[in-house]
């Protein structure tokens, strides 16, 4: 008997997390539509139904190259020889390898690498906390975590990212957002909800300022576009703060009553005159003044930032400067400004991770915590203590907010210092493509005693593993998210398709794999829920509903905002005030205020190197329809963007003898990689931008090919030396490097 089903699911092909309706027959995907019952269905541009990734969902689900059963390596590592094995054998072997590593070298010798936060990370933390390792690494040092943790240290809770109160039809009111400052972000390629809101805002006269080295679609809409030299964002922000203070444009009442350290800020920014900063940033002093006055005079306003800041060598200090600017004009936790949502009335992800089970002795062994103390356990423990004092709950999962330092971890594998790392578990990540200094990553993954990857595909990283475990995608698992505990909202989605079909595929959710390993490793009492849906029943229990009931009622929870909560509770910081001068930084022996310094590799700091490598290389800008290193093997998606591109100014291309579409070498002191040149007059002739995330699934998986990981992978060129990382976050610099570009010779 044929059975037809419809399920409301959350698409997690990217971070937009659109709600969709999955239609299936006998467990097979038939079609996917927008969920028109979802309140935010029309809040993105382009609309969900136009998304190429979503339209390729069936191709993704039933792709011939999908990993469908557990694979065990039977040849040498990287030789490409695999054997399909039953789940029981695979899980027994993985559990035994982890147990052996822990027994022989200690739990800290096991590390886990993570990706972009689209798995249920609270359970990854839960498993590894109980196992006893503090070493979870990934993109947290350079992706959103710096923003979340800087907000938490200064405001006592992270701002709801991208919160803009747009107006429809009428002129802006006193409660509407009146000015938007976008820094290091291109929403049209990465954050479609923000992009939709900005477009609507501009139609209604809201002011827009964009700081970006490239003329993005957002910059084209701006009243003021600040095309700054890469890496000088903080200096420009400090000059803007100086102008706001000198001209008396700040919110004096808010600053005096609720802010800590204003006088010290005023003293620190005094040397950052518009003229001085203009010289170093390639901007004009008048443009900096105009941007500062526009932002301060049009309140309430919001700042929207992205990886363009977090990929810099002084990311935390730059984020602090951004927060100071928006705070002194009174934009924090007010309608139309930057909203601090606080916790929800449900059990959040951060309450599921069992952070208390990781002992102080093991916490002290976290790799990198001695040097990169803020985005790491020392800083996290300080911020969360103060958050809980005001809010009674934490605001982030530990595995995301307190990352171990990835470059230090890979070096520990190779050197055994400060202690050896012997086993690595890769979950929802592809470090051979997405981690900086990939040559070092390769050496480490080849050396490690045991390596397992949980993924959909045989990625370059998976090709180096001992076991590859096939995981269920968003189509095959339910979802319940409060943004890792940072928000009071909830978004739910049902499981749309079965995770296993006899004879065709047998996928498991990350939760199922973790729980199965946990049962084998003596953690049974801490895993009472047999599947994800049961964990969601538990999280929803304070609301008096089950997950099925929550979905039947619409599957969303979005409480009405409550503004100016600090008037009654204060801020969740050590001083109880909004900390412009950050005492948490001071406690960790860092400068409590931002101070500009030149990045490790640019024409100013390294004029000697610039003689051979005269161009500034930036990377990491998002581009559709790819998402990081994903979708390279989905033909319908790949056809729209088949090749890795290097943006170069037409004048510079002509000078170098490079034609549109020519293959070129991009070379830094660390190596070279091949890209296709595209001429773009929205970039300074002294700067080039290279796309990231490129590998070629169509090339052989065995060495030396590894699916073309050495061909056009920009992380062959990037640097991750600890001395060049952000001193607070440990983030590696992806926005400032020196390079040269020349044509690939044709024979």
Image (cartoon, grey):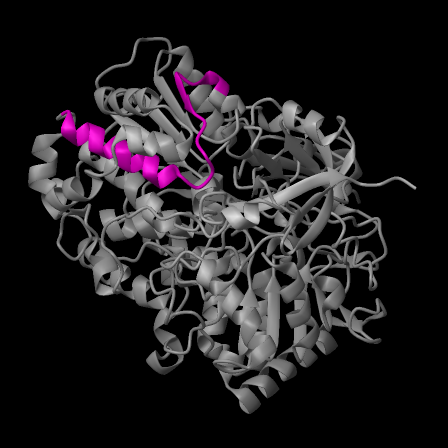
Q: Residue 441 or 344: which is nearer the viewer? A: 441
Residue at (65, 47) in percent of width and height? 693
* Residue, far right: 747
On the rendered image, what quadrant is the C terminus found in?
top right
Residue at (21, 33) in percent of width and height? 242
In the image, is 640 to the left or to the right of 441? Answer: right
Residue at (30, 9) in percent of width and height? 171
Does residue 246 show up magenta in the picture? yes
* Residue, far bottom: 104
Q: Position of residue 690 (x, y in %)?
A: 63, 40
Query: Would you place residue 531 above or below residue 576 in this image?
Result: below
Residue at (73, 67) in percent of width and height? 464
Q: Residue 647 or 470: which is nearer the viewer? A: 647
Query: Would you place residue 341 above or below residue 585 in this image?
Result: above
Query: Would you place residue 129 above or below residue 244 in this image?
Result: below
Q: How many labels does the image show?
A: 0
Query: Would you place residue 47 above or below residue 468 in this image?
Result: above
Q: Position of residue 677 (x, y in %)?
A: 72, 32
Q: Where is residue 413 in the image (x, y as percent from the top left)?
A: 59, 76
Q: Quadrant of residue 399?
A: bottom left
In the image, is 223 to the left or to the right of 264? Answer: right
In the image, is 406 to the left or to the right of 234? Answer: right
Q: Residue 708 or 166: which is nearer the viewer? A: 708
Q: Where is residue 545 in the image (x, y as percent from the top left)?
A: 40, 50
The reply to whether residue 543 is in sight is no
The part of the chain drawn in magenta is 220-247
The reply to whether residue 695 is in sight is yes
Does residue 286 show up magenta in the picture? no
* Residue, far top: 170
In the image, is 143 to the left or to the right of 333? Answer: right
On the rendered image, what quadrant is the N terminus found in?
top right
């Amino acid at each position: 008997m044929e059975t037809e089903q419809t399920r409301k699911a959350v698409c997690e092909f990217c971070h937009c997390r659109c709600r969709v309706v999955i239609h299936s027959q006998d467990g097979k995907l038939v079609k996917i539509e927008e969920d028109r019952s979802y309140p935010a269905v029309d809040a993105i541009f382009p609309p969900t139904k136009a998304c190429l990734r979503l339209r390729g969902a069936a191709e993704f689900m039933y792709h011939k190259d999908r990993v469908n059963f557990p694979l065990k390596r039977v040849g040498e590592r990287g030789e490409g020889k695999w054997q399909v094995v039953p789940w029981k054998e695979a899980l027994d072997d993985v559990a035994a390898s982890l147990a052996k590593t822990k027994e022989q070298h200690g739990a800290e010798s096991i590390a886990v690498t993570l990706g972009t936060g689209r798995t249920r990370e609270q359970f990854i933390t839960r498993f590894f906390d109980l196992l006893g390792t503090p070493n979870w690494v990934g993109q947290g040092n350079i992706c959103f975590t710096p923003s979340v943790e800087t907000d938490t240290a200064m405001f006592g809770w992270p701002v709801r990212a991208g919160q803009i109160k747009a107006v429809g039809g009428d002129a802006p009111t006193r409660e509407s957002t009146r000015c938007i400052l976008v820094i290091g972000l291109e929403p049209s390629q990465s954050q479609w909800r923000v992009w939709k809101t900005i477009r609507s805002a501009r139609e209604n006269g809201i002011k827009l300022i964009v700081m970006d080295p490239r003329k993005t679609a957002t910059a084209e809409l701006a009243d003021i576009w600040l095309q700054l030299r890469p890496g000088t964002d903080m200096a420009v922000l400090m000059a803007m703060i100086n102008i706001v203070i000198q001209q008396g444009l700040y919110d004096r009442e808010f600053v005096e009553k609720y802010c800590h350290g204003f006088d010290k800020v005023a003293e620190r920014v005094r040397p950052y005159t518009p003229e001085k900063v203009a010289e170093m940033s390639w901007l004009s002093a008048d443009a900096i003044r105009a941007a500062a006055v526009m932002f301060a005079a049009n309140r309430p306003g919001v700042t929207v930032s992205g990886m363009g800041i977090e990929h810099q060598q002084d990311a935390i200090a730059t984020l602090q400067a951004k927060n100071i600017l928006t705070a002194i004009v009174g934009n924090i936790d007010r309608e139309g400004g930057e909203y601090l949502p606080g916790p929800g009335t449900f059990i959040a992800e951060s309450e599921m991770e069992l952070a208390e089970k990781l002992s102080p002795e093991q916490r002290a062994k976290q790799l990198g915590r001695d040097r990169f103390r803020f985005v790491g356990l020392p800083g996290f423990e300080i911020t969360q203590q103060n958050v809980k004092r005001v809010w009674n709950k934490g605001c982030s999962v530990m595995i995301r907010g307190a990352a171990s330092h990835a470059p230090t971890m890979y070096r520990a594998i190779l050197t055994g210092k400060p202690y050896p790392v012997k086993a690595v578990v890769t979950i929802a990540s592809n470090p051979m493509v997405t981690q900086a200094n990939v040559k070092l990553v390769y050496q480490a993954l080849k050396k490690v005693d045991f390596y397992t990857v949980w993924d959909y595909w045989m990625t370059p990283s998976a090709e180096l593993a001992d076991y590859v475990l096939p995981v269920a995608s968003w189509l095959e698992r339910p979802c319940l998210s409060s943004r890792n505990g940072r928000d009071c909202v909830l978004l739910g989605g049902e499981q749309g398709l079965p995770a296993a079909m006899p004879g065709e595929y047998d996928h498991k959710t990350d939760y199922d794999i973790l729980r199965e390993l946990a049962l084998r490793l003596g953690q049974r009492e801490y895993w009472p829920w047999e599947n994800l849906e049961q964990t969601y029943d538990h999280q929803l229990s304070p609301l008096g509903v089950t997950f099925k009931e929550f979905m039947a009622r619409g599957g969303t929870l979005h409480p009405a905002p409550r503004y100016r909560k600090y008037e009654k509770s204060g801020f969740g910081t050590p001083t109880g005030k909004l900390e412009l001068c950050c005492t948490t930084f001071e406690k960790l022996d860092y400068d409590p205020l931002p101070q500009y310094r030149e990045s490790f590799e640019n024409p100013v700091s390294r004029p000697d190197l610039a003689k051979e490598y005269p161009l500034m290389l930036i990377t990491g800008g998002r581009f559709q329809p790819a998402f990081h290193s994903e979708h390279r093997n989905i033909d319908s998606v790949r056809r729209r963007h088949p090749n890795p591109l290097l943006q170069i100014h037409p004048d510079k291309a002509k000078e170098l003898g490079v034609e549109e579409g020519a293959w070129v070498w991009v070379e830094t002191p660390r190596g070279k990689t091949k890209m296709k040149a595209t001429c773009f007059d929205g970039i300074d002739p002294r700067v080039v931008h290279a796309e990231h995330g490129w590998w070629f699934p169509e090339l052989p998986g065995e060495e030396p090919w590894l699916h073309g990981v050495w061909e056009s992978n920009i992380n062959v060129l990037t640097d991750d030396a600890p001395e060049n990382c952000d001193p607070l976050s440990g983030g590696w610099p992806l926005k400032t490097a020196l390079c040269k570009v020349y044509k690939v010779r044709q024979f």
